[in-house]
Image (cartoon, rainbow, N blue to C red):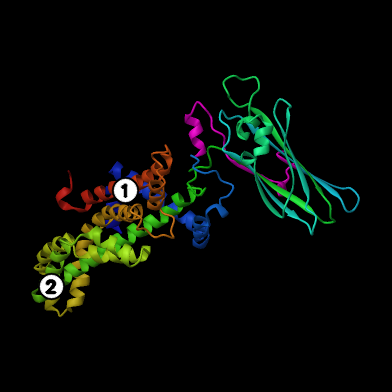
Amino acid sequence: MSSFKRNLQEILKYPSAIAGSLIILALVIVAGIVITTIPYSEAIRLWRGGEDVWYANPQYAPPAWINYFRSEKLPVSFALDSFESDGEQVVTTFEDVDGTTSRTNITYTFDFQADVVPQEISLYFDATYESKQPFASILWVTPDGREIRIGDFGVDKQRTYRLSQDEKLKRRLGGVPPMDGLFADPNSESGKPLKGTYQLLIESVAFEPGSTLHAEFVFFGQVYGLAGTDHQRRDLTLPLLYGVPIALAFGLLAALGTSIMTMIIAAIGAWYGGWVDELIQRITEVNLVLPFLSILIMVGTFYSRSIWTILGVTVLLSIFTGGIKGFRAIFLQVKESAYIEAARAYGSSDTRVIFKYLIPRMIPLLIPGLVSSVPAFVFLEASLAILGLGDPVLPTWGKIINDAQTNAALYKGLYYWVLEPAVLLMITGLGFAMLGFALDRIFNPRLRGI
């Protein structure tokens, strides 16, 4: 315990160690919250659901916070549902006319203060009836009191109505694209949209007892959420958050498995010597000249891209590296120590000597290397995903960058799509690197006082 307190006091002397520890602690807390609030099955469903799940999101939309850095404000996406009538933004009234015929009026009210028109406005209808369709009339009311007839039509049980695709509406607006025409300021010569409070009114008539009509109003703006959306309208907040536990798990498991196995194998070879040590050294020398990344690419291409398969192959290929030779050199020195001779004199077994006397001497030197190696494995997993060889199921940082690359995000000016996961990768690497360097100066006698 005294040794732990002494090491902790040494760590607190290094600002880089404190900063690195805080970054790692924040990542661990985020990972814990994400895992407990979003079950694995739900995360996979959302990630692979595509437009069936993210239908109410705009496509290729940057995060909403970029408006704080723009002089020209972009419209923010939102959705209003008639099921959730709140008396302010959504008002739904029902009137039974004669027992057979009924009227439902839905009014959506929203404030528009952007300098650019939205991508699209859509209505998703959900009607119940036996044989006679409900009939809906849609009216658009501008902030200056103008009323524009949007359309009149019968509603199927499931219907999607996109205003920008209605050619009749376009002709009614004088050939102007509907989004431009509906938000146009008649007194503006610059083409800027009219700001203020808009309303969309749906007046529906049902012709059967019990027949109902509900509608969801979706405003597809130019920006969305905390992280934006991708080509499949998926909210990038999900893979950015879920990528934290995946990256930490892969990096920590790979670093821990590699470091421990390397140390144990080096200790066994140094203690037994002879053909055992020769075999370990020859395997290490052969493994050092093998193309590490090429082998992983071959495994992902011809066998499996499962993250567990990649993790296993990574650990296997990383055991017999230069670390074995470094550990072996130290173990050969420790092997000749007086306390090792004493242990052998009173009859300690080989296993006891290796695991009770040799390996514990290496743990202080193992910890800094273990911490410092975590970013390398995190970047490795991301690199494979960027090459299209990551786990096809999991939402990871590398997968985000791969999708962005596939869809030419940088050429389209969608920099957020690449920068967000890249920044998280850099922050993760920075945290572990700062802590690892500080620990190396604390536990490595040759670096103390430097």
Quadrant of the rendering where the C terminus is positioned: top left
Please name whichever residue, 124 or 77, is drawn nearer the observer in this view of the structure: 124
**What amino acid type should be assigned to the residue bearing mark 2?**
Leu
Quadrant of residue 116 within the rendered picture: top right
Quadrant of residue 128 within the rendered picture: bottom right
Please name whichever residue, 54 or 321, is drawn nearer the observer in this view of the structure: 54
Q: Is residue 144 magenta?
A: no
**Residue at the (28%, 65%) spot, across then down:** 313
Residue 106 placed where, x, y %?
A: 75, 43
Q: Which residue is mark 1?
A: 429
- The magenta segment: 63-91
On screen, residue 195 above or below 212: above
**What amino acid type should be assigned to the residue bearing mark 1?**
Gly
Q: Secondary structure at mark 1?
A: helix
Instruction: Say if residue 311 shows up in the picture.
Output: no
Mark sitting on residue 279: 2
Q: Crowding at label 2, few (<14), some or many (≥20) Cα neighbours within 10 Å?
A: few
Label 1 to label 2: alpha-carbon separation = 35 Å
